[in-house]
Image (tube, rainbow, N blue to C red):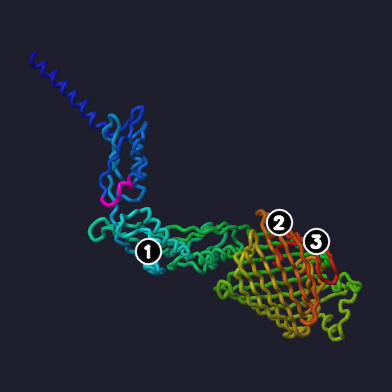
C-alpha cells in the first residue's frame, strides 16, 4: 500500500511538470492569437547603437495599439521582413511577444549595419574612380558643400541607399552607351580595418562571344560578315550593337533581328545573342502602275535573294506595257571577299518617251534598248562605299508621233537623233547612314556618280549625277527630302537625257514634261504610319531641266497619298498619290498616280 501512494504522487508530479512546460514553451514556438486577438501594449527595442528608435518604429508594420488576429507568427515574420528591407540592419530583426495576459509586449532585437567610412571601387577603366564615387559620396561644390550624396560618412549604412548609389553609377555607363555594364555583389565590412567600408567591383560588360541563333537556311558566314563592330574582348556599346543589328537586318534576309544579353562564365563578361527570324527569300511578285505615255505598265518577276543560303541574289523580270515587252536578268553577290560586292546583268527593254506633252507639238518615240553591265564595289567602312561599272547598250528608236527634235539647231538635231551603241565606264561613291533602307525613319544617303561614254562606241559624252536623301523623325511621322542634280557634256543622245514629270519625279505633272542634259529635282514628303499596313503621305515635288543651267524650264506639283503594305504578295508599299500641278507647261493638271515602292 505504501508503495502505491508513492506511484500516484509521482504521476501527479509528472503531469504538473508537463503542463507547466507547455505553458512556458508554447509562446516561443507559435502564436495562435485568441479569437478576439492580441493587443500590442508596448514595443521594446534592443541592439541599437547609433540609430534612433524612431527608425525602427517607423519601419515596423506593427504599431502600439494594433490587435493581432489569427496567425500571429506569420504577421511577426512579415513585420521582421519589412523592417529588414528598410536597409539599416545587417541581419533580419527578431520579433517576439511576451506577457500575453492583458496585452502583449512586442520585443524587437536588431543588429545595425556599421557606420559608413568610405567606398573602395575597382574594375572601372572607362571612367575615373573619382567620377564614379561622386554617385556615392556626392559632389563638392564651389562653396564646399556636398550635394547628391547617397551615403554619408559617420552615419549608419543603409543598403537601400547603397543600391541607389549603384544604380547611379550604372546610369553613368548607360548614358554613355555601355549597356552591358553591371556591378558584382557589393560587400560591407563588419570587422577590423574593413569595418564600415563598402567594396564595389564594376563589370563594364566586356564581350565574351557573339552568337547567332535562329538560322535555318542562311549560313552563319553571311550574318557574321555584317557583324563588324561586336567582337570578343571589346566593351559592349549600344551604338556598336545597333549598327550591327541594322546591317544584319538590311540584308533583307530576316523578318526580325533581336539582341539578348546573357551572363558569361567569365567574370565581367557578357554573351551577345542575336536572335533572327528568317524571311521568305524566294519571291514571285508583280508590279503594276499607270503611265500617261505607256498606259498600264507592269512586271512579273522572280527573285531569290539568298541563293544556297549564301546571300547571293538572282532575279528575272518581264515587263509589259502598251509598248513591246522587256526582259531583265541579274546576278548579284552582296557579300564577296572582305567587304566587296559585285553583280552582272543583261536586258532587252522597250520604253515609250514623249516631248512637248499636252501641246499641239506633242511627239512620241518608241525606244529599244539592249545591253549588259557589270559592276564591282567595296565597302570602305560602315557608311561609305565605292563602285566601278562597265556597260554596253544598243539604242534604236522609232518616231511614233510628231517631231521630238523640233526647235533644235542642225547640230543638236544630229546629236539627239543618232542611233547606235553606248559604251560607258562609271564610278560611284555612296555614303549611307539610314537606319533601315526598306522603311527609313532617320539618316541620309548621298551619292556622287560619273559616267564616261566613248571607248569605241557611237557616242562620246560625260554625265555627272549627285543625289542626296535625308530623313528625320518629326512628330508621329518621318520627314524625307531628296535632291537630284544631273548634267552632261559632249554628244548626248536623246535617250540619255534626263526626263522629269510623272509618278517617280514630279507628281501631278505629265510624264517627260521636262527634258534636257541638265536637270535638278527636289522632293519633300511627310510620311505618317496609321497602322502596320496603312500610311498617309503629303508631298511637294519640283524640278528644272534644259540644255544648260541657264536655260531650264520648271514644273512643280503637290498632293497627298496613301501607302499600303502587302508583304504576303512579296511587294513593297503600294503607292497611291493624287497630285496637282502648281507650275508647268500645262497649267493646273490633276493626276492620280499608282506605283509600287516608295519614290525615294
Instruction: Return the x and y of residue 558 as percentages of the image width and height.
Output: 77, 65
Left or right placement of residue 219 versus residue 477 in this view: left
Question: Quick check: can you spot residue 126?
Answer: yes
Q: Quadrant of the N terminus?
A: top left
Tag 1 secondary structure: strand
- As for residue 510 lying within the magenta part, the answer is no
Count every numbered label the image shows and give the total: 3
| In-front residue for pair 14/382 | 14
Tag 3 secondary structure: strand
Q: Bounds of the magenta span?
A: 49-56
Q: CA distance from mark 3 to mark 2?
A: 16 Å
Of pointers 1 and 3, the one earlier in the residue sequence: 1
Of pointers 3 and 2, the one earlier in the residue sequence: 2
Identify residue for label 1.
Answer: 146
Identify residue for label 2.
Answer: 564
Give the residue displayed 74% in from the left and 73% down from the top.
Answer: 521
| In-front residue for pair 144/560 | 144
| In-front residue for pair 589/426 | 589
Of pointers 2 and 1, the one earlier in the residue sequence: 1
Identify residue for label 3.
Answer: 592
Amino acid at each position: 500500500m505504501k508503495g502505491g501512494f508513492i506511484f500516484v504522487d509521482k504521476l501527479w508530479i509528472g503531469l504538473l511538470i508537463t503542463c507547466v512546460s507547455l505553458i512556458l514553451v508554447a509562446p516561443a514556438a507559435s502564436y495562435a492569437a485568441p479569437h478576439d486577438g492580441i493587443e500590442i501594449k508596448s514595443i521594446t527595442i534592443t541592439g541599437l547603437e547609433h540609430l534612433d528608435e524612431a527608425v525602427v518604429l517607423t519601419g515596423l508594420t506593427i504599431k502600439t495599439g494594433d490587435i493581432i488576429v489569427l496567425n500571429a507568427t506569420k504577421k511577426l515574420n512579415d513585420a521582421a521582413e519589412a523592417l529588414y528591407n528598410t536597409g539599416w540592419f545587417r541581419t533580419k530583426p527578431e520579433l517576439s511577444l511576451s506577457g500575453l495576459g492583458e496585452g502583449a509586449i512586442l520585443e524587437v532585437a536588431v543588429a545595425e549595419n556599421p557606420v559608413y567610412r568610405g567606398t573602395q571601387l575597382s574594375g572601372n577603366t572607362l571612367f575615373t574612380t573619382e567620377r564614379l564615387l561622386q554617385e556615392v559620396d556626392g559632389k563638392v561644390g564651389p562653396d564646399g558643400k556636398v550635394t547628391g550624396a547617397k551615403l554619408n560618412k559617420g552615419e549608419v549604412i543603409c543598403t537601400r541607399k547603397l543600391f541607389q548609389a549603384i544604380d547611379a553609377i550604372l546610369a553613368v555607363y548607360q548614358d554613355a552607351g555601355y549597356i552591358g555594364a553591371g556591378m558584382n555583389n557589393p560587400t560591407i565590412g563588419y570587422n577590423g580595418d574593413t569595418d564600415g567600408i563598402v567594396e564595389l567591383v564594376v563589370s563594364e560588360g566586356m564581350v565574351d562571344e557573339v552568337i547567332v541563333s535562329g538560322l535555318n537556311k542562311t549560313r552563319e558566314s553571311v550574318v557574321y560578315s555584317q557583324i563588324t563592330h561586336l567582337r570578343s574582348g571589346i566593351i559592349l556599346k549600344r551604338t556598336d550593337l545597333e549598327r550591327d543589328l541594322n546591317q544584319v537586318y538590311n540584308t533583307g534576309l530576316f523578318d526580325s533581328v533581336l539582341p539578348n544579353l546573357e551572363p558569361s562564365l567569365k567574370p565581367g563578361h557578357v554573351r551577345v545573342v542575336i536572335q533572327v527570324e528568317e524571311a521568305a527569300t524566294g519571291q514571285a511578285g508583280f508590279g503594276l502602275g499607270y503611265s500617261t505615255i505607256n498606259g498600264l505598265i507592269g512586271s512579273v518577276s522572280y527573285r531569290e535573294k539568298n541563293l544556297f543560303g549564301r546571300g547571293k541574289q538572282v532575279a528575272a523580270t518581264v515587263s509589259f506595257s502598251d509598248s513591246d515587252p522587256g526582259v531583265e536578268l541579274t546576278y548579284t553577290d552582296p557579300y564577296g571577299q572582305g567587304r566587296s560586292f559585285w553583280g552582272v546583268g543583261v536586258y532587252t527593254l522597250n520604253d515609250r518617251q514623249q516631248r512637248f506633252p499636252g501641246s499641239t507639238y506633242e511627239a512620241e518615240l518608241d525606244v529599244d534598248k539592249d545591253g549588259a553591265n557589270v559592276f564591282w564595289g567595296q565597302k570602305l567602312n560602315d557608311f561609305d562605299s565605292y563602285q566601278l561599272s562597265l556597260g554596253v547598250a544598243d539604242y534604236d528608236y522609232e518616231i511614233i508621233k510628231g517631231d521630238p527634235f523640233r526647235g533644235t539647231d542642225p547640230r543638236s538635231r544630229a546629236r539627239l537623233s543618232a542611233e547606235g551603241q553606248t559604251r560607258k565606264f562609271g564610278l560611284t561613291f555612296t555614303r549611307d547612314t539610314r537606319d533601315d533602307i526598306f522603311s527609313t525613319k532617320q539618316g541620309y544617303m548621298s551619292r556622287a556618280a560619273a559616267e564616261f561614254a566613248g571607248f569605241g562606241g557611237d557616242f562620246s559624252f560625260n554625265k555627272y549625277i549627285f543625289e542626296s536623301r535625308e530623313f528625320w523623325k518629326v512628330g508621329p511621322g518621318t520627314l524625307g527630302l531628296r535632291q537630284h542634280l544631273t548634267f552632261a557634256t559632249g554628244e548626248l543622245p536623246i535617250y540619255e537625257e534626263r526626263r522629269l514629270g510623272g509618278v517617280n519625279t514630279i507628281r501631278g505633272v505629265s510624264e517627260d514634261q521636262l527634258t534636257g542634259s541638265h536637270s535638278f529635282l527636289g522632293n519633300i514628303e511627310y510620311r505618317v504610319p496609321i497602322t502596320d499596313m496603312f500610311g498617309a503621305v503629303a508631298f511637294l515635288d519640283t524640278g528644272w531641266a534644259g540644255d544648260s543651267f541657264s536655260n531650264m524650264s520648271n514644273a512643280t506639283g503637290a498632293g497627298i497619298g496613301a501607302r499600303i503594305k502587302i508583304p504576303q504578295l512579296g511587294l513593297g508599299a503600294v503607292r497611291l498619290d493624287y497630285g496637282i500641278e502648281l507650275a508647268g507647261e500645262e497649267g493646273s493638271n490633276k493626276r492620280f498616280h499608282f506605283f509600287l515602292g516608295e519614290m525615294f
